[in-house]
Amino acid sequence: MTLTLLGLESSCDDTAAAVVSGRDVLSSVVLGQNALHAAYGGVVPEIAARAHAEKLDIAVTEALARAGLGLTDMDGIAVTAGPGLIGGVLAGVMMAKGIAAGSGLPLVGVNHLAGHALTPRLTDGLAYPYLMLLVSGGHCQFLIVRGPDAFTRLGGTIDDAPGEAFDKTARLLGLPQPGGPSVEAEADGGDPERFAFPRPLLDRPGCDLSFSGLKTAMMRARDTLVAAQGGLRAQDRRDLCAGFQRAVRDVLAEKTRRALALYAAESPAEPAFAVAGGVAANGPLRAALRAVCAAAGTRFTAPPLALCTDNAAMIAYAGQELMAAGHRADMRLSARPRWPL
Ligand code: KG4
Ligand code: ZN
């Protein structure tokens, strides 16, 4: 039976609500908060929590209206119950409990990371188990996804996420934010061999990654150039970006090769790999991962960006699978700032 769920997401700086029925996204509303946090150089948790509390109602009303449905058409409510900024998660959980209590609809709490990890089922219908690489400004990990509540983490970053390193690089070189797209554009005309960037953790077995050393290398290379020439030339910027991007691509491709080998050892019936998260938008990285998958005989997928970045459709979808597997929450559902998969 196809379930139709209302999903709520408020764990970071996007207030989102969506209606999803089976694999059909009937509506997906994402109200960002960038303007509220811009002056502070990052997300301010108190401001985020207050904005979520104010906007959740609007997001829910809008999501139902765009789907052309009412609460009575829903089979349940799914809400992100963590991990994330606690004030925002709490606002979402309270809202979901209120709707559930008022309507009598069943409630299910969803792990935000599970929402990201199940997105390839929503968008591409992947069969379990599949291999997933989550790469964004906040996440970097390899998961074997076995079911809506069954994940095996093969490895991940031991320090920063790659998106953070792209953003820092852009800041160091005076390029606009978000850093990923501007570094990628700049790298296009650059020589990736001119500067020697490290390939962190490639000498160590396993699928763990590290990106903080790349940030340091970028800072050193820039400082050396500035000291020698009194500033950066346009070509220096291009070459620095090209070298940095090549290093990120190389480590992610090699670790993906290793993760695919571990996954293949389980002889999945329909081997598939999915990459998701903001950094997955990077052209050269995508091409490299696609090639690694082709060599391993594994299907390559990358969900559309709108469903890779934070949204509530992924929460509504994950909620459906959890409900179908018998999961239910009650009024004791609590918000969890930390919640490893
Ligand atoms: O998934 P996302 O939108 O948000 C979270 O981190 O939760 O990812 C944003 C990150 C930013 O760090 C941004 O610089 C990076 O994804 N990004 C890229 C590209 N587009 C966005 N990184 C590399 N290349 C890109 N084309
Ligand atoms: Zn996220």
Image: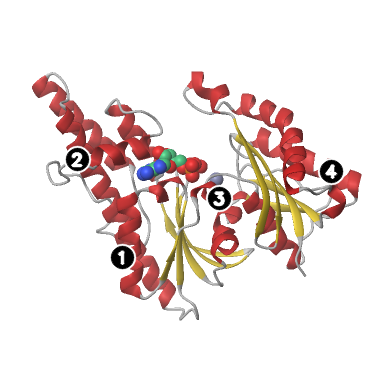
What amino acid does circle 1 point to? Ala
The x, y position of residue 150, in whole percent, is 60, 66
Earlier-in-chain disc, 3 versus 2 = 2
Ligand 1 neighbours mark 1 (CB distance < 8 Å): no
Q: Is residue 185 left or right of residue 237?
A: right
Q: Within 10 angstroms of label 3, few (less than 14), some, or many (20 or more) residues?
A: many
- Asked if labels 3 and 1 touch by Cβ distance under 8 angstroms, the answer is no
Find disc 4 in the rendering and name its residue.
Answer: 99
The x, y position of residue 13, in whole percent, is 58, 34
Q: Which mark is residue 291?
A: 1
Residue under the image location 46 percent in, 70 percent down: 272
Measured in 3D between alpha carbons, the distance from the residue under mark 4 to the one under mark 3, in whole angstroms, is 24 Å
Q: Secondary structure at mark 2?
A: loop
Task: Indicate the quadrant where residue 163 lies.
Answer: top left
Mark 1 or 2, which is nearer the eye?
A: 2
Measured in 3D between alpha carbons, the distance from the residue under mark 3 to the one under mark 2, in whole angstroms, is 30 Å
Q: Quadrant of the N terminus?
A: bottom right
Earlier-in-chain disc, 4 versus 3 = 4
Q: Within 10 angstroms of label 2, few (less than 14), some, or many (20 or more) residues?
A: some
Find disc 3 in the rendering and name its residue.
Answer: 307
Earlier-in-chain disc, 1 versus 3 = 1
Q: Residue furthest left?
A: 228
Q: Within 10 angstroms of label 4, few (less than 14), some, or many (20 or more) residues?
A: some
The x, y position of residue 34, in whole percent, is 54, 28
Q: Looking at the picture, does residue 42 appear above or below residue 239?
A: above
Measured in 3D between alpha carbons, the distance from the residue under mark 2 to the one under mark 4, in whole angstroms, is 53 Å
Find disc 2 in the rendering and name its residue.
Answer: 189
Q: How is the image coloured?
A: secondary structure
